[in-house]
Amino acid sequence: MNQNSYSYNEQPLHEPIEVDATFSRKLLGHCRPIAFRTESGREVQITEIGLIHPKYDGLKTLFAFDITDGATDYRITLDTESLNWYLDYEGDHYV
């Protein structure tokens, strides 16, 4: 997974997505996304999870997942307050 593929100086996409995930105390800090669908209907099967890290927006906690489908790197974010998921980055650019 290319950890340098994101341009952090840009605003994230923040595109709402639907995510299939498993939740378990034994798997990667309880939550493991396995696939996601964009609003356009494109489905991405996640083959590897890289970093998982919390981000804070005031009192709200967001969890960012750096993931790949084997061809493209993505960052998806779980908003723990609303339980909504967002696609923030895709590959080397914003889409």
Image: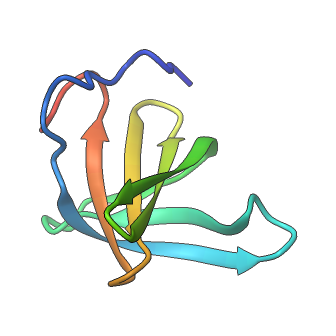
Q: Is residue 83 above or below residue 36?
A: below
Foreground pick, 83 / 58: 58
Foreground pick, 64 / 42: 64
Please name the residue shown 43% across and 15% down the image.
Answer: 4
Residue situated furthest front in the rendering: 58
**Colouring method of the image:** rainbow
Please name the residue shown 40% across and 57% down the image.
Answer: 56
Residue situated furthest bottom in the rendering: 82
Q: Is residue 35 above or below residue 89?
A: below
Residue 21, percent from left and from top = 57, 74
| Quarter of the figure with residue 58 | bottom left
Quadrant position of the C terminus in the picture: top left
Quadrant position of the N terminus in the picture: top right
Q: Is residue 41 above or below residue 68?
A: below
Residue situated furthest top in the rendering: 4
Residue 20, percent from left and from top = 50, 75
Residue 52, percent from left and from top = 59, 48
Please name the residue shown 37% across and 71% down the image.
Answer: 60
Q: Tag count in the figure?
A: 0
| Quarter of the figure with residue 34 | bottom right
| Quarter of the figure with residue 17 | bottom left
